[in-house]
Image (spheres, rainbow, N blue to C red):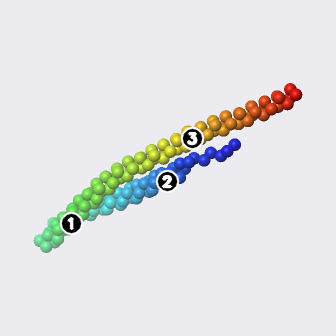
Amino acid sequence: MAKFIFRLNSVKMVKENCEKKAKRELAVINNFISDHQKMREQLIEEVNSLRNSIKLRMTASELKFLSGYKNSLAMKIKNEEAELNRLEQEKKRKISEVMQKAKEKKILTQLEEHQKEEFIKEENKIEMKQFDEIAIQNFSRDKK
């Protein structure tokens, strides 16, 4: 019996590699999102601790400095949130890309399975013809 060789195997391997690459890129994006969320949380914590550290008696320069620092932290928080939104959009795009790559790979896998089944059927037909031929030859020898 001959061995089944899927003629689109190289295409299937390329699709699998593309899917793995997209999954790795998605994981990197998830790590970036996690890092930026932690950074935003740290900035929020710092703003909260800044509010708690305000004393009853402070000089005008200290209040001005704290106000400027608080505004600076607020801008950093806004920047982190904007970056998080951008990363979330990138994540959605990457998820749809991963799903598309998975569909393409699944289609090729199904095609391979179908072709393998057809190959096995053909091999079985050939094998049955050979058995029939042997049986006919044995029968004709026994008659003589």
Sort mark 1 into few (<14), some (14-19) or many (20+) by Cα contacts within 10 Å.
Answer: few
Q: What residue is shown with label 1?
A: 72
State the SS at label 2. Answer: helix
Point out the residue furthest to the front here: 144
Quadrant assignment for the N terminus: top right
**Mark 1 residue type:** Ser
**Mark 2 or mark 1, earlier in chain:** 2
Looking at the image, do the residues carrying marks 2 and 1 touch, with CB atoms under 8 Å apart? Answer: no
Residue assigned mark 2: 14
Mark 1 lies on a secondary structure that is: helix
Viewer-closest of 26 and 65: 26
The foreground one among 28 and 80 is 28
Does residue 109 appear in the picture of this structure?
Answer: yes
Give the residue type at disc 2. Val
When asked about the image quadrant of residue 141, the answer is top right
User: Where is residue 99 shown, x and y percent of the image?
Assistant: 42, 46
In the rendered image, residue 74, in percent from the top left (x then y), is placed at: 21, 62
Marks 1 and 3, how far apart at CA: 64 Å
Q: What residue type is labelled 3?
A: Gln
10 Å neighbourhood of mark 3: few (<14), some, or many (≥20)? some
Residue found at x 29% / y 56%: 86
Q: Is mark 3 on a helix, strand or loop?
A: helix
Q: Residue at x 26, y 57 (%)?
A: 82
Q: Which of marks 1 and 3 is in front?
A: 3
> Relative to 106, is 1 on the left or the right?
right
Residue 108, compared with residue 44, is above or below; it is above
Q: Mark 3 highlights which residue?
A: 115
